[in-house]
Amino acid sequence: MKLLYNNHHQNRTQRMAFAGLFVILLPIFVPNLFEPLGRASPTMLSEWNAPKPRHSSLLKIALHRQIPTEQQSELWSPLVSQGWRPCAESTGTSSLPKKSRGYVQVFLDGGLNQQRMGICDAVAVAKILNATLVLPHLEVNPVWRDSSSFADIFDVDHFISSLRDEISIVKELPSEYSWSSREYYATGIRDTRIKTAPVHASANWYLENVLPILQSYGIAAIAPFSHRLAFDNLPTNIQHLRCKVNFQALVFVPHIRKLGETIVHLLRHPPGKLQASGTEFHKGRIGDSEVTGAGKFTVLHLRFDKPVILVAVKPKNWL
């Protein structure tokens, strides 16, 4: 009886060993059987079907391609005007109204591009209403939580000086209106807040809906304000003013400009030898004459579309 049990146990062990060997060798002899599994998840089986780069040949050609010097120079040369004229050209005459009708506040959300467009629209709305613009308030972005203020990004003095012949701009409200703040409007319904501005509203909408509040209270706060002014059917001087704000009045603060110039310089003239310290590298490379010529670089534009934002801001316990 004991002998029969030992033979049975030995045979079972051998069968299990053969079964394990079969499972290990099966992917080698029949790889197509495990191809879907290999793509589905990074398990041990997926190592047998490691993904191969589909564009390796194109990448290899791009890396070894020799770009003519003339073509490199053309890449960085100014674009041909093709008959286009700058829309922000100054007329040389002041159009600043003699008396302001009150103060306009705007609260801008979104990314830097949306906030920049909102600043251009805010100046245009202040011009339409003959009002004084309070330096726009930049909301804290809920995705990347940037708390930078207008003064942290843009040169405030240059902004005010560039538009002094167009509208009046103040850095902060006078003491009599100091109560008009973001916190004030977040705690209740206020008569001085306009939160029903439609997307791409016309100039007439502001004259009909915002101007009466200015005349009654001396101040109007518009929030939200993203994309709240139309692009079409506006007076030519308002469109020119928008252009002037975007291309002349909005200038980055010096340290941001310097960083941008450094990046562009490195793209145009890659250094032959990198310094050990990244800080020293940024400080000392712009004036460095030891360059190897223009190299290859890649521009990656990351967009925050709605599904990406939803994933980024939802609580961790949702995952």
Image: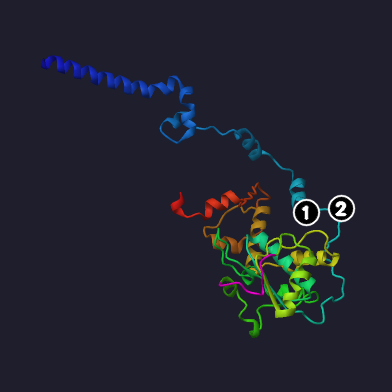
Of 287 and 219, the residue lying toward us: 219
Whole-percent x, y for residue 226 in the image: 68, 62
The residue under label 2 is: 82
Q: Looking at numbered disc 2 in the image, what kind of residue is underneath it? A: Gln
Farthest-out residue, bottom: 176
Check residue 168 for magenta coloring.
no
Q: Are marks 2 and 1 in contact (CB under 8 Å)?
A: no
SS category of the residue bearing label 2 = loop
Residue 115 numbered mark, or none: none
- Please report the residue visible at 74 percent of the width from the left and 60 percent of the height from the top: 200
> Mostly what secondary structure, the magenta segment?
loop
Which quadrant holds residue 230? bottom right
Of 159 and 291, the residue lying toward us: 159
Point out the tag, 2 or 1, that comes first from the N-terminus: 1
The residue under label 1 is: 77
Q: Is residue 299 above or below residue 235?
A: above
Of 225 and 214, the residue lying toward us: 214
Of 199 and 279, the residue lying toward us: 199
- Please report the residue visible at 60 percent of the width from the left and 34 percent of the height from the top: 56
Q: Looking at numbered disc 1 in the image, what kind of residue is underneath it? A: Ser
The quarter of the picture where the N terminus appears is top left
Q: Is residue 30 left or right of residue 250?
A: left
Q: Is residue 209 above or below residue 99?
A: above
- Please report the residue visible at 65 percent of the width from the left and 85 percent of the height from the top: 176
Whole-percent x, y for residue 19 in the image: 32, 21
Q: Is residue 309 above or below residue 12?
A: below
Which quadrant holds residue 291? bottom right
Measured Cα–Cα span from mark 2 to mark 1: 15 Å
Whole-percent x, y for residue 276 in the image: 52, 58
Check residue 191 for magenta coloring.
yes
Residue numbers of the magenta segment: 187-196
